[in-house]
Amino acid sequence: MGRRPPPGQPDERSSLWLDPPWRVEGENGVVASSYGFPDEPEEDETTAQYRRRFEQKCRESDLLIGRVLVAVAIDQLSSDLTLTFEGGCQLRNFAVDMHEDENWRFRDGATGQTYRVRMDGVKVSGDFH
């Protein structure tokens, strides 16, 4: 999130990583989801064909580009995450496996802390709460 720093400068950008399943919702319903997202080339597919298919799937969530994040909600029982952006668009992540190392992760670029979230707790830069 943000611009890459010049070479040799610390990276103070924040980042968010989501383990599937997730979906992006616009004003008229679901516009993108992790379902069917290509994670590797098909058997008869070239690298270029795979890349085009992957980039097309990525473009489905372009409606979030440039929108301001206005609310964050974390379900206390499941660790499901809902990010609401201006205009009412939402990005939702659903924690489905309590044995996963993490269901989603946020790196705070300002503090350098990383929050790893799974169904049974939050790990902040190495400590489980």
Image: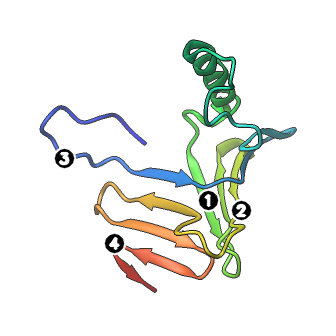
What residue does disc 4 label? 125
Mark in the foreground, 1 or 3: 3
Q: What element carries label 2?
A: loop
Q: How far apart are marks 2 and 4 (CA)?
A: 22 Å
Please determine whether, in this image, residue 62 is positioned above or below residue 80: above
Residue type at numbered disc 1: Ala
Q: If you read the primary sequence from the N terminus, does the residue marked by circle 1 or circle 3 appear first? A: 3
Residue type at numbered disc 4: Ser
Please determine whether, in this image, residue 20 is positioned above or below residue 115: above
x and y percentages locating residue 81 in the rendered image: 65, 63
Q: How far apart are marks 2 and 3 (CA)?
A: 32 Å
Q: If you read the primary sequence from the N terminus, does the residue marked by circle 1 or circle 2 appear first? A: 1
- Give the residue displayed 67% in from the left and 53% down from the top: 20
Residue type at numbered disc 3: Pro
What residue does disc 2 label? 94
- Give the residue displayed 71% in from the left and 29% down from the top: 60
Give residue 10's mark.
3
Q: If you read the primary sequence from the N terminus, does the residue marked by circle 3 or circle 4 appear first? A: 3
Determine whether, in the image, residue 70 is placed left or right of residue 22. left
